[in-house]
Amino acid sequence: MLITQTVDVGQPLAMVWDFFGDIPQVAACLPGANLTKEVGENQYEGDVVIKAGPVKLEFAGAAEIKDRNESTKTLQVAASGSDKKGRGAASMVLTAALTPAGSGTKVKISLDLQISGAAAQYGRGMVSDVTAVLISQFAATMQSRLTAISQGLDPNQVAGPKPASGLMLGLQATGMALKRVFNRFFLPYKPQPSR
């Protein structure tokens, strides 16, 4: 499934591009993600923990920068992992494309996500909604870290995202699902004028 979101940040393009060159810094913006070690040039190992309602998934996996294009300011990262309890697997390709937007930067994030096992049983809509919530939280943390860097502060001292868990993640995803259902059933109806 492909999920896209565009985020506007207040920092200039060069600064945001440098930020995306530091993959551990980028990973620190994703709720539940933790890079544990660099295993080669542009290759990392780590964990992702996601808890939504009664389901807790703990993935161990690897990520690799597949493409970093300086001239087009695009970055592509491929990652895959397996649930530590053997209940499924996930793989993703994340593409970030940066363009100037006034004095700031527009970041288009595309996430092509494939899930099997326990997480897949919740259906495409719910997985898409949870992922969209995680991307929104990623964007907010990225902005906080960029702001800290622009002020000369250590971005690692900025409060990071809360773990990808708990009631709020479920409520936000449920709200998105309800909105989608409402839009599907009620917005297309337009009463015809009487003659």
Image: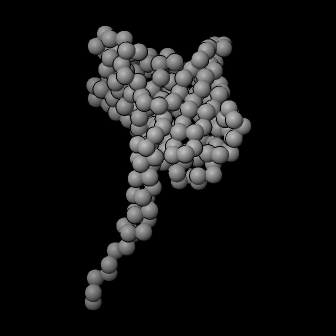
Q: Position of residue 81 (x, y in %)?
A: 66, 32
Front residue (pair 93, 132): 132
Query: Can you name the residue that lies furthest to the bottom here?
Result: 195
Front residue (pair 127, 75): 127
| Residue drawn at x 32%, y 78% as measured from the top left | 191
Q: How many marks?
A: 0
Left-right relation of 170 to 41: left
| Residue drawn at x 35%, y 26% as measured from the top left | 143
Left-right relation of 121 to 174: right
Q: Is residue 17 visible?
A: yes
Front residue (pair 17, 33): 33
178 to 29, vertically: above or below: below
Coloured how? one colour
Q: Is residue 42 visible?
A: no
41 to 8, vertically: above or below: above
Q: Position of residue 111 (x, y in %)?
A: 54, 38
Q: Quadrant of the C terminus?
A: bottom left
The quarter holding residue 194 reads bottom left
The quarter holding residue 189 reads bottom left
| Residue drawn at x 46%, y 46% as measured from the top left | 170
17 to 108, vertically: above or below: above
Query: Can you name the residue that lies furthest to the right here?
Result: 86
Q: Position of residue 77 (x, y in %)?
A: 58, 28
Q: Position of residue 89 (x, y in %)?
A: 68, 38
Left-right relation of 193 to 113: left
| Residue drawn at x 60%, y 37% as measured from the top left | 57
